[in-house]
Image: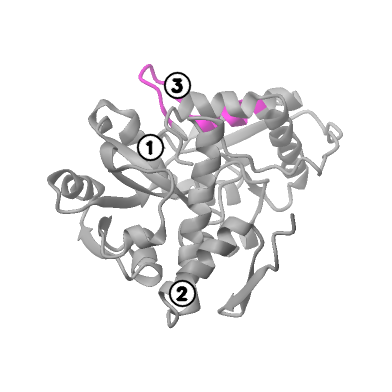
Amino acid sequence: MDPGPKLRFAQDDVAYECEHPLLRKRLARAAKLAPDAPMMRLFAILALAVSNLVASQAAAQSRVVVPNFWDQRIRLDRPEPGPPRIVRFLTDDDYPPLHFSAADGPLTGFSVELARAACEKLGWTCTVQARRFDTLLDSLTEGRGDVLAAALNLTPQLRSRFAASHLYFRSTARLVTTRGNAQIDLDPRTLQGKRIAVVGGTAHQAFLERLLPFVQRRETGTLAGAIAALRSGEAEFVFADGVALSLLLASTGGSELAFTGGPFLESRYFGEGVGFLTRKDDLALKRGLDYALQSLWDDGTYARLYLRFFPVSPF
């Protein structure tokens, strides 16, 4: 059945097109609810609809959502092996579950184990070294390592300095509420006037202020303060980083809380995503990593590692 004409709209010289019939329906309903709302606000409501669609599809398929960043129509050729070398990965040891030191000392985490799996796939000899997060970029620039395997959200500035592999992770923003209040599908009308706790001075606070001004923000100094506001009833939701919230929900201290709705992925607020970074003069590494990442998705290694480190998915 023909889903009907697409919805097209523009904001800040950027054109957007909405083809999915469910999303068109929700955006049209939002426009009726707020006919004088700026287009950016309607775009925020569309973003909420997208997040709900992701959540609905995920609930129908799996309790733990494994994100897929690869277009299966694009197939990469295995790169030719270069001269023998030891590839030095650099990371930070204090950002679980992506990269951290295990209780018995070794570096581990989703990014770290994905790097090791990529090396095995390519037959590379690799090392993984920990450095302070604020020294990683300079260490790569100065040749003290070859690849960064850390949760650095890609930006135009980073892309101008380094070569980036295909994305293997994205930062999400999520809403959390009490378990009895959680629902898969959040209609925009259900957030009208709701009290949402958010850490002040963050991208999440800016997102709510700019794109969801019809909610009541309860700004706190820390995520712990936002969670406390939810538990006390001062707030009905918490809006924060999906990784931090997934760690909380996976702990015993978060058993009475749950995600509600789906992930928010607006890149202007939450980043383009995370890939391996190499120097621009080392494109052979980037090409090898691109091939390895797609191969690790194809053979199920990516999903196995993701489920190991994200028992509660931020997606």
Q: Is 288 or 144 nearer to us in this picture?
A: 288
Q: Which residues are magenta?
A: 100-117
Q: Residue 38 in the image: x percent, y percent?
A: 45, 80
Residue 304, labelled with which disc?
Answer: none
- Under mark 3, the amino acid is Pro
In front: label 3 or label 2? 2
Q: Is 126 or 59 nearer to us in this picture?
A: 59
**For the residue carrying disc 1, how many other residues have a C-alpha within 10 Å: few (<14), some (14-19), or many (20+)?**
many
Residue 246, labelled with which disc?
Answer: 1
Q: Residue 69 in the image: x percent, y percent?
A: 65, 43
What residue sits 50% from the left and 57% below the top?
49
What residue sits 42% from the left and 47% below the top?
261
Q: Looking at the image, is mark 2 or mark 1 earlier in the sequence?
A: 2
- The number of discs equals 3
In front: label 2 or label 1? 2
Q: Which residue is mark 2?
A: 32
- Under mark 2, the amino acid is Lys
In this picture, residue 243 sits left or right of residue 43: left
What residue sits 31% from the left and 35% below the top?
248
Q: Which residue is mark 3?
A: 106
Q: Residue 48 in the image: x percent, y percent?
A: 46, 58
Q: Quadrant of residue 178?
A: top left
Residue 105 magenta: yes
